[in-house]
Image (cartoon, helix red, strand yellow):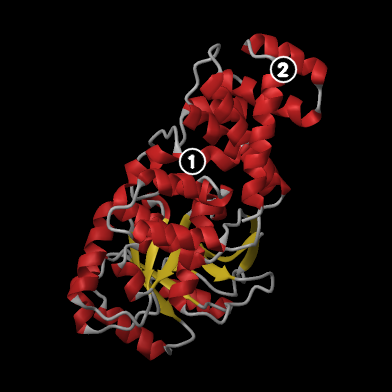
Amino acid sequence: MFFYVARQPILNESKAIYGYELLFRDGPNNSFPNIASDEATIRLVEGSEFNAGVKLLTDNNFAFVNFSESALLDGLPSLLPTDKTVIELLEDIPPTPAILEAVQRYKGEGYQIALDDFEYHPDWHEFLPYVDIIKVDFRAMNTAHINQLLKDLRFFTGRLLAEKIETYDEYQQAKSLGFTLFQGYFFARPELIQKRVLSSSQAVCMRLLELTSEPNYHIDSVAELIEQDIGLTYKLLKFVNSAFFRRQSEINSIQQAIVRLGQVEIRKFSALIAAASLADGKPDELIKLSFIRARFMELLAQHNEQYKVEPASAFLTGVLSKLDAMMDNELTVILSGVAIAKEIKRPLIEGTGPMAFFLRTCEVLEQGNWTQLERLAQRLRIKPAQLIEYYQQAQQWGQSFAKT
């Protein structure tokens, strides 16, 4: 499954990249889909941050993202990193007290604020101290209109961005009027980016939404459900490390991630995932293999006395062990923005530690290398027949999810 996003560069006076406006696409044709703006924003945020990572999509430059009135009030921008996100208020957003309060809050958290396709009205005056960038559409305004707008904004201390610049003359005119940021076809058309992402079963997403909607849901039930879906597991870990929490927090199990989030945020996560509807049917062979590894490593941790490993951490290590093959990328890149403990990252990336030994045992069983299995069994102080039995139990467990 793929996630599609178009990015259009925004340049400074030296024609160096300042950032990119991110535009949702639902396929490789690089055109805006026929869906509501709210749905497009939700799918853009979910797909970019929980899969690819906004900073990777923008080469660590600023990401300009459009938000509607409801998205602003619902807190959707908070899912994106504070230091590299410019929150664009769409032109149809009314300057209400609730919107002003939201803008003040986002500004205080470290986001930049931009007003898109701006046309001056006195009601916007009290917003201006919190605004960093005002975007002016050069296709929608003539020279007289732009000059009047600049007079109305004479006390504005932020930056002016000229958008939809299509000719050299328009670029020169914008510079002469004091614009310092520029965007338009004169510089570049939106560039389509395609990223492979993990799909999440729609049935699991909807069940998660149901579970977390209950007044007092059971953490174990939610964790058990999330463990059934590799995509949800990965996205949950990304969510824990999102801008909501402001700092990296090491996670050792899915239960711990759910506890750390709390009821309000886990419900927000569930709603976002369900709304994005990234369903792609039943698990493929790679996902089934991850399930088998996760369950085998959990069983091994429960019954092994030679190496002291938390079963929940062993399970999570197995779940994540095939992400590189699923997402066509290196684990070092995939896990760079995920809040998991070092004892989980180390076996996956460096191949060291007890759980790396557990993973090696999985691989030997997958390959049917009985000679090597004898050696590993000796180190684990478990009979080879017992390891095979654990693996068969794990296969049955993994196959059961393939049928749901």
Q: Residue at x 23, y 59 (%)?
A: 105
Q: Amino acid at mark 2?
A: Pro
Q: Amino acid at mark 1?
A: Val
Q: Residue at x 62, y 41 (%)?
A: 397
Q: Residue at x 43, y 90 (%)?
A: 142
SS label for mark 1: loop
Residue highlighted by disc 2: 384
Residue 198 location (% of width, % of height): 61, 53
Q: Can residue 398 be seen here?
A: yes
Left or right, 66 with reference to 72: right
For label 2, count other residues whose C-alpha is less than 10 Å away and answer few (under 14), some (14-19) or many (20+): some
User: Which of 230/381 is in front?
Assistant: 381
SS label for mark 2: helix
Residue highlighted by disc 1: 338
> What numbered label is drawn on residue 190?
none
| Comes first in the chain, label 1 or label 2 | 1
Q: Residue at x 49, y 16 (%)?
A: 308
Q: Is residue 113 above or below residue 366?
A: below
Q: Within the image, what quadrant is residue 97 found in?
A: bottom left
In three-dimensional space, the C-alpha distance between marks 1 and 2, rounded to whole angstroms, equals 35 Å
Q: Can residue 16 be seen here?
A: no
For label 1, count other residues whose C-alpha is less than 10 Å away and answer few (under 14), some (14-19) or many (20+): many
Q: Is residue 192 above or below residue 365?
A: below
Residue 162 location (% of width, % of height): 45, 74
Q: Within the image, what quadrant is residue 90 found in?
A: bottom left
Q: Is residue 395 above or below residue 233?
A: above
User: Which of 203/33 is in front?
Assistant: 203
Residue 11 location (% of width, % of height): 51, 63
Left or right, 16 with reference to 404: left
Q: Quadrant of the N terminus?
A: bottom right
